Amino acid sequence: MPSAHELPETPLERPKRGEQIRPAGIGETVYQSTQEQQRAVEQSKRRSGPPAEPPGYEVQRFLGAGTFGQVWVGTDRNTGRSVAIKFFTRHAGLDWPLLAREVEKLAFLAADRYVVQLLDVGWDADPPYYVMEYVERGSLEAFLKTQEKISVEQIVACGREVAQGLLHAHAKGVLHCDVKPANILLDQDGKPRLADFGQSRLTHEQTPSLGTLFYMAPEQADLGAAPDARWDVYALGALLYRMLTGHPPFQTEEALANLGEADGLDDRLARYRQLLHDSPPPNEHRRIAGVDQALGDIVSRCLERHPKRRYPNIQAVLNDLDLRAQRRAKRPLLVLGAAGPAFLLMLMVFFAYYSFQAVLARSREALVTRALESDRFAAEYVASAVTNDLERRYLEVERLANDPEFLSELAGAIRDPELSASLTVLADPQTDRKVLDQVRGRYLADMQQRPDCPVTRLQERVRRIMQDPSGPPKASWLVFDPLGNQLARWPVSDTIGRNYAWRAYFHGGEYDREPNWRPAGVNDILSKTELSPVFHSEATRRWIVAISTPVRQDGDLLGVTAMTFEVGKVADLPGAKTQFPVLVNLRAGKHQGLILEHPLFARYPEYPLGFMDADYLVTQNIFPDTRRVKEDYRDPLAKDPAGKPYSVRWLADHAPVKARGVNTGWEVIVQESYEEAIGATLQEMLRDLIWIMIAQLSLFAVVVTALWGFVLWSYAPAGWGGRWSNRGRFDSLSSSEASSSASSAGSTDHGGIERKDAP
């Protein structure tokens, strides 16, 4: 019997005069006239009991009413099984051949668990009836209306069950031709069952059959079309689309309005075909969360508007569903097969990275330790060389101080009556400058004009000493009387005749005193050979230092003699290409931390003079006294524009300079470029390790790729086509909810009689 939601079956009856056809909603195409609808409602209100009592069945309760009769729920007296009994109470207009064909097809599909089963037929009864299974959970349409969300896999499982039912029907030569949610009932296990075969056709029949709009293939919407298995393929795709998106494909408000304006059935079908032809392919289902590429392709191919591009039959749909299920079932293994090597690879990379880091750290530590040991050895070597140089200078100064001729000449000078008076005036800080200049002038004149003058002989002696090529380099040689007056000097300078008792090299203190300071006695004068603090020469304007010693004869102090030499010309590291020494003054005093010697001074001879007061020449705050600083030493001269080549990382160590077993306060720092010392070696080692790691990872990737290629190849011939059952259940709807929703939704239940509680 045709459902109240279906277009009339062929012989296609045109709507009679006065009948109304309104636009189809989801899963319904209504053809009842207004009078029939009202009559059904009134009759439903007037019922007081079942139209008859079929033999062997106990009628229990009313379920619904439709165009041609009523549906009641009963019980088989023999088995106690619940059944649905359809009474055809309104014979007028009933197409008996159509009803007979539906019963015939239901009988043809007997014992098929995917189809609502026909149990009994009472053609001779009054009214006629037939008995079917009672499927208590109602229609899929009612279920979908009560659910806010259904999982994709639950939808696929339902669709596969429907497809399996269609496959069984097709195998027995029956095409359903009207698959939609209202024609699918859910059994007590939540599994779908096909119902309402009123529009079905046998495969050899050529009689057209109209399904439900938006579930009907475009070629089916033709009064001259012959039934085709691909109609059910399209309807299956529309069913899946409806469950995924909430509405069938191509259904919009505009489409409904357009179809509602149709003038008759032919125009309506033509408009429907044109709508499907002009609209873009439906793709909304692909945007649903959980819909993968395979499922989206299956639904899209089912909904192909041209039948030749559609699946040729239901079996092809099931094959792809099975293929998808098989791939998804194997996905954990595939993921594990991919994730396992990936995780192993990550572990390998992790341990390789930390192993490399550990190797590099140990190698770096060893290289740095070895380099610092080399720097320490070099610093000690240079410090020893500077010590030896100072020892030579000490000995040369002392040799002159003990020279008998020099002693005689110095004693004669300070005891000369004429010179003695002048020296007393020169030593007095209260002497008027004008007078002082006059006395100095006479002193210099005597030195130049009197060949027998003692200071002339002293001047000649220091000249010979300075010009002796066998001695160490000197800046000047000085001779002073006990009052601090400079008696002789070479090279000659206007400092001769001036008083320098305030200089540290004369009084032996740690620093220079004020220029007007004078010693109170011999205890305020240098008592032994000493290295003076660094001072700024008034004659050369350079940083110099003096080695001075007292001159005594028979216990009497005759004066002081001193050798001066420029800093920056003492330390050397011969043959070293990546190391160089720096000499630093660490003696307490005004110039503590002063850099005395640096390679930059040799490149720019004027540098110490032009920048003698710069703060960055003082390095006591960053002296390499810890391992951390030694490994990352920063050259203080790098702060100067001329010192940019030194703004790199250095390794550095140091050693003190001693003279006669006493620390002089000088320190030798040996600097070595970190990059040249170990950086290049570490980089080369790192490159080697990286290439080893790349080679290992490449080999690992090749092996894994080859294994996976073999696995994929081995699965390709037959593995993808296996049968994997993925059947789900719609268990979230209770029996009471299903019964109430089925009766209130006005959907077709148990064979197609629709209950109408309202016109």
Image (spheres, helix red, strand yellow):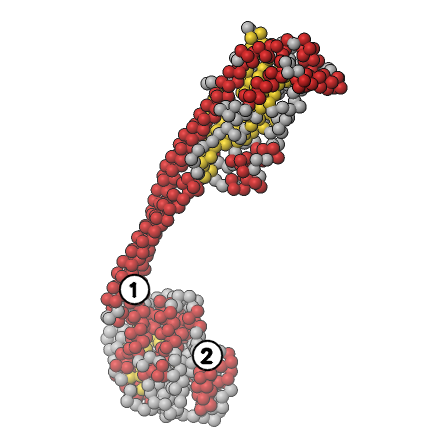
Judge left or right: residue 574 versus residue 173. Answer: right
Q: Name the residue nearer the viewer: 515 or 43.
A: 515
Whether residue 104 is visible, yes or no, is yes
In this view, the residue in front, 752 or 577, is 577
Residue 589 against residue 202 in the figure, above or below? above
Which percent across, then down, holds residue 272?
A: 45, 85
Q: Going from the N terminus, do you reach mark 1 or mark 2 first? A: 2
In the picture shown, does residue 459 fall above or below 227? above
Q: Residue at x 67, y 8 (%)?
A: 417
Q: Position of residue 525 (x, y in %)?
A: 59, 13
Residue to which mark 2 is pinned: 280
Disc 1 on helix, strand or loop? helix
Q: Is residue 433 above or below residue 181?
A: above
The residue identified by callout 1 is 329
Q: Position of residue 396 (x, y in %)?
A: 51, 19
Callout 1 amino acid: Ala
Q: Secondary structure at mark 2?
A: loop
* Residue under the image location 58 percent in, 33 percent down: 608
Hey, which quadrant is residue 199 in on the image? bottom left
Tag 2: amino acid: Pro
The one nearer the camera, 343 or 81, is 343
What number is the disc on residue 345?
none
Look at 55% across and 40% down and name the residue there.
643
